[in-house]
Amino acid sequence: MASTKLTDSVEFPQSVNPSRAIITVGVIGIIASLVGLAVNTEQFLFSYLTSFSFFISIALASLFIVMIHHITRSSWGITMRRIPETFASYIWVFVLMFLPILFGMEILYSWTQEQSGWFYEGLRQLKSPYLNEPFFIIRNIIYFGVWSFLGYKLYKQSIAMDETGDWGIDTAMRKVSAPGIFIFAFTLAFASFDWIMALNYDWFSTMFGVYYFSMSFQALFAVLILMTIYLRKQGLLLNTIKRAHVRDLGAWMFAFTVFYAYIAFGQFFLIYYASIPEEALYYIKRLDNNWEFLAYFIIIGRFVIPFIVLLSKPAKGNFKVLVSMSVLILFTHFVELFWLVMPAYHKSFHFSWIDISTFLGFAGIFLGLFFFYFMKQSMIPKNDPKLLESLNKH
């Protein structure tokens, strides 16, 4: 294999600092959201849960891809790995962001209320050993404890390898990732049950955890594409993150477009075919009263258009195409989470300005923290044993 040296500066220049704009947007969003909290507490909580589910999905998918990199010892994404490592490093912040959801449990989740009017009388009592407030809090403490430990631990070890050049740390990260990914799979599935599926107490789906994972992982590749192209547009890592790396991200985004469609349709089709009332009502509610237009948009924006556009090999390496598809997928990701959450509050389609303000507030915090950490360290794992192989990718 031909030898390739690292020729780019791996330090984020202070002259390229988007933090001011990001913080400004975030502050505006937070202030507007606080106004929304005072004006309409119920709407604020459901809007908040939607935005929370959106941004933590990016952080959790980032943690997953980092662990996958370590246990498979793959080299293709080494030059881009610091981006998801950074996203995963501050999952602990979502513990604080989760507090409004805990304080608003009795508004968000009907199973916390004495009279809920559920489809089956006594269903609340039947599920109460799992769906009760103390156990709900305990489970979420476990979720965030596991994710925060894994994200922060892997990030700190990667930074330590940058500083010491000790390749033994690479083995240590694999030892953390191997059991970590197994535990992660269970905690993510149950967290999606608790946060979103439990909004409709009389509905259940064993596929929902994989469904949430598939949409999150597709959205992550859209974020990685936008971030890597942003760095290249700023003249950063041009010889390190090559077009071939970005093309691979496009290929992965296409692959998970197909995987997402398979899981989403599989969940819908089984419920449609079985036609069990307590399961079918969930989709009936989301395919009526103008909610059906969002469902059609999700199908088109999340699968049909990306699938057709990214089907050809040249499209996967075309930056303009990738940016447009990434923006479409991320927008549809938010729309889909909105479609999953809001019918539990509004019987017919309703969009509020609080939906926008909470999203902007989360975006300011999430991206602000990313650039805060990303600018402090090397933009790539510069002493990773697989870096040379990644640099040689064409």
Image (spheres, rainbow, N blue to C red):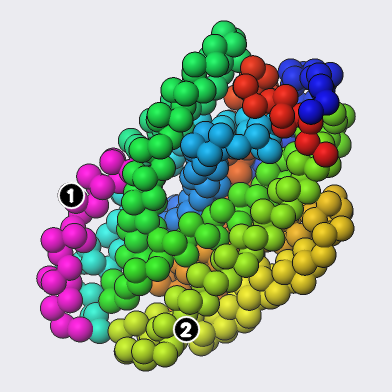
Percent position of residue 25, x then y: 67, 41
The vertical placement of 364 against 171, above or below, is below
- In the rendered structure, which disc, 1 or 2, sits on the residue that comes first in sequence? 1
- Residue 298: % across, % down: 62, 72
Q: Is residue 177 left or right of residue 198?
A: right
Q: Is residue 266 left or right of residue 222?
A: left
- Residue corresponding to mark 1: 134
**Residue sitting farthest toward the front:** 1
The quadrant in which residue 84 appears is top right
* Dominant SS type (magenta): helix
- 303 or 348: which is nearer to us? 303
Residue 130, x across and y down, in percent: 18, 60
Q: Is residue 44 left or right of residue 292?
A: left
Q: Amino acid at mark 2?
A: Phe
Quadrant of the rendering where the C terminus is positioned: top right
* Left or right: residue 274 compared with residue 391: left
Q: Which label is found at residue 159?
A: none
Q: Residue 349's spot in the image, x, y percent?
A: 54, 78
Q: Amino acid at mark 1?
A: Pro
Q: Is residue 370 magenta?
A: no
- Examine the image and state in which quarter residue 239 appears: top right
Instruction: Tell me which segment is drawn in magenta.
Output: 120-143
Could you tell me which secondary element the residue under label 1 belongs to? helix
Q: Residue at x 20, y 84 (%)?
A: 120
Give the quarter of the figure containing the N terminus.
Answer: top right
Which of the two discs, 1 and 2, sits closer to the camera? 2
Q: Which mark is residue 269?
A: 2
Q: Is residue 123 magenta?
A: yes
Q: Secondary structure at mark 2?
A: helix
Q: Is residue 30 above or below residue 322?
A: above
